[in-house]
Image (cartoon, rainbow, N blue to C red):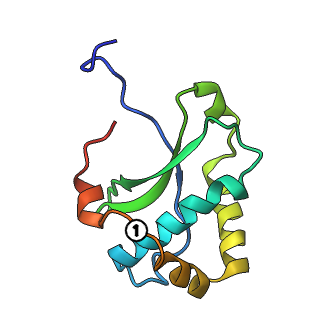
């Protein structure tokens, strides 16, 4: 398959319930999402090993795009084994409530990640 024929990657989406609590501060959201992203393989240890997590911009038909965590796999059968969007969000929300937003903010300060402008302008794979 040539580069032009390569299909765009599809994603499962996780939107952790942090945006309002972080006052839509995109740089803080980016670092918190990156911290959360690094913890998801532990949280979802039952997922197939081929599942990967990355930050992606999500287009919003009602406003500006915003960052979310995208789940993908090169093996479509892996994605079929994942819970539905709402179930993923619920599991992540429960975990976030257990550790607390302040802990996430503290841990996120130790993490380097790209800024929102860079992610927003990145070409999709």
Q: In which quarter of the image is residue 46?
A: top right
Q: Is residue 29 above or below residue 8?
A: below
Q: In this view, does 102 lie above or below 118?
A: below
In the visual, does 49 lie left or right of 7? Answer: right
Q: In which quarter of the image is residue 119?
A: bottom left
Indicate the secondary structure of the residue bearing disc 1: loop
Kindly give the residue lying farthest to the top in the view shown. Answer: 1
In the visual, does 61 lie left or right of 104? Answer: left
Q: Which residue is drawn at 71% across and 62% down?
A: 91
x and y, in percent, of residue 99 in the image: 69, 79
x and y, in percent, of residue 86 in the image: 64, 56
- Quadrant including the C terminus: top left
In the visual, does 79 lie left or right of 29? Answer: right
Residue that carries the numbered disc 1 in the rendered image: 112
x and y, in percent, of residue 51 in the image: 60, 40
Q: Residue at x 45, y 59 (%)?
A: 68
| Nearer to me, 122 or 38 | 38
| Nearer to me, 46 or 18 | 46
Q: Which residue is drawn at 23% across and 63% down?
A: 117
Q: Quadrant of residue 29?
A: bottom left
How packed is label 1: few (under 14 Cα within 10 Å), some, or many (20 or more)?
A: few
x and y, in percent, of residue 53 in the image: 53, 49
In the visual, does 9 lie left or right of 64? Answer: right
- Quadrant including the N terminus: top left
Kindly give the residue lying farthest to the right in the view shown. Answer: 46
Q: Residue at x 28, y 14 (%)?
A: 2
């Amino acid at each position: 398959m040539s580069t032009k024929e390569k299909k765009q990657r599809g994603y499962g989406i996780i939107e952790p319930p942090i945006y309002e609590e972080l006052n839509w501060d995109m740089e803080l959201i980016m670092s918190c999402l990156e911290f959360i992203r690094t913890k998801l393989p532990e949280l979802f240890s039952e997922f197939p090993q081929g599942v990967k997590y990355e930050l992606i911009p999500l287009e919003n038909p009602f406003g500006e795009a915003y960052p979310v965590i995208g789940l993908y796999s090169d093996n479509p059968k892996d994605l079929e084994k994942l819970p539905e969007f709402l179930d993923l969000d619920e599991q992540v929300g429960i975990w976030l409530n257990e550790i607390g937003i302040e802990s996430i903010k503290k841990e996120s300060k130790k993490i380097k990640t790209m800024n929102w402008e860079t992610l927003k302008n990145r070409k999709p794979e």
